[in-house]
Image (cartoon, grey):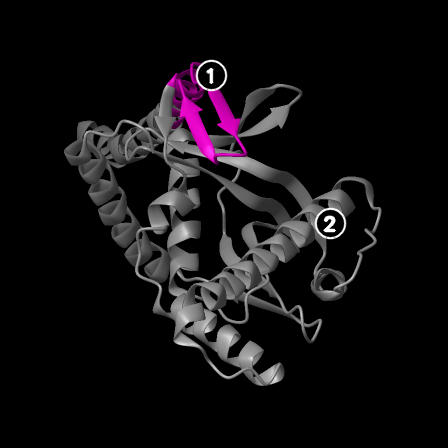
Amino acid sequence: MKRNRLLEVVYLVPIFCFMVFKIDYGFIDYQLRRMRTAKADAINITFNPTKHIYTVNGVKTPSVTTILGILNKPGLLNWGIRLVVEYLAKNKIVPDPTKSYQYLRLAMNARDEAADTGTKVHSAIEKYLRNGQPSSFSPPQEAGTAFSAFLKWLETNHLEPVALEGVVVSLEHGYAGTFDMLATVDGTLWLVDFKTAKDFFAEYVMQLSAYKAAIEEMGGYWVREGENYVFKPLLVPIETVGILRLDKETGMPHFKAYSEEELSQALEKFIALSTYYHLNQQTAGNSSP
C-alpha cells in the first residue's frame, strides 16, 4: 500500500513541477513585459524631420539610415556616372573636363528627384491606408506608377494596418528609426518597408533587422499622436519581415521576405556599424549624430 502511494507521488511530482514552472514562466513573461513597458513609458522622443535627428530623453540619437550611411555604396556612384553619361549622350554634348562639377550637379539633382519620388510614394501609401483616398500625382508620373504597384499588391494580399510610420528606439545600441508599416497580412504580423529603387540592396535587410531588434528590445514602438509620441506594446510576435519594392517604371510590385538567418546576420553587421559610428563620434569629439 505504501509502495503504491510512493509511486503515485513519484508520478505526480513531474506533473506538479511542470504546472508550477509553466505558471512561473508565464508570470516571468508578464513581469518582463511590465518592466519593458515601464521603461518605455519613461522615454521622451522628439524628431527633427529637417535635420533627420531623433532626440531620446534629451540625447541626440542617430537614425538607422544615418548609421547605414557610413557604408560604401559603389552602386550609387555607378548610378550617378550612368546618369551623367546618358545626359551627355541624349543632348549630344561633348564632355568638357572643366565642367565636371556641373555634371556632378546633374547627377545629384537626379538623386534628389529619385528621393523625392520615394517620399511622394510613401506619403501616398500612408494617406491611402489611413483614409482610403488615392492620391493624385503631378508629372513626372514615376510616383503614380509606383503607387499603382502598391495597389496591385493589395489585390492579392489582405492587409490590415497596425501602425504606420512607427518609431523605434534601441537604448542598448544607441539608435532610433521609423519603419514604414506594421500590419497583419493574411492573419500574421508583418514588418514592411516600401522601396522604389530598381533592385533589393544589401543595406535593406540591415535596416529592417535593426527595426525589428529595437521593437523586440523595448517590447513595442511609438506612434505620433498630436505633438507627442505614444508607446504601443507589441502584442504578438512579428512573423514576416520584408521589403515591398514598387517599380516606378513597370508599375509591378515585388516583395522579398528575409529569413531569420538573414536577419540575424544582418543585425550583427548593423550592430558593428553602430558601434563604429558611436566610437567615431567620440573620437572626433562630436556629440551630435
Identify the residue at horizontal 72%, vertical 56% (top origin): 158
Residue linked to disc 1: 41
In the image: residue 222, left or right of residue 161: left
Q: In which image quadrant can residue 121 be found?
A: bottom right
User: Which quadrant holds residue 17?
Assistant: top left
In contact (CB < 8 Å): disc 2 and disc 1: no
Q: In which quarter of the image is residue 9?
A: top left
Image coordinates for residue 105, horizontal then vertical, percent: 50, 61
| Magenta-drawn stretch contains 42 | yes
In the depicted structure, whether residue 77 falls above or below residue 108 = below
Task: Name the quadrant of the C terminus.
Answer: top left
> From where the camera sits, is residue 187 visible?
no
| Local secondary structure at mark 2 | helix
In front: 58, or 1? 58
Decide: is 85 above or below 184: below
Query: At label 2, which amino acid type do we have?
Result: Ala
Indicate whether 271 appears above or below 241. Answer: above
Distance from Cα at disc 2 to Cα at disc 1: 31 Å
x, y percentage for residue 267?
31, 51
Numbered mark located on residue 165 in the image: none
Q: What's drawn in magenta, residue-wise?
A: 29-58
Q: Where is residue 134 in the image (x, y as percent from the top left)?
A: 83, 51
Is residue 207 visible in the rendered structure shown here? yes
Q: Is residue 49 magenta?
A: yes
Residue drawn 18% across the image and 35% down it: 284
Disc ID at residue 124 = 2
Q: Where is residue 238 in the image (x, y as percent from the top left)?
A: 49, 46
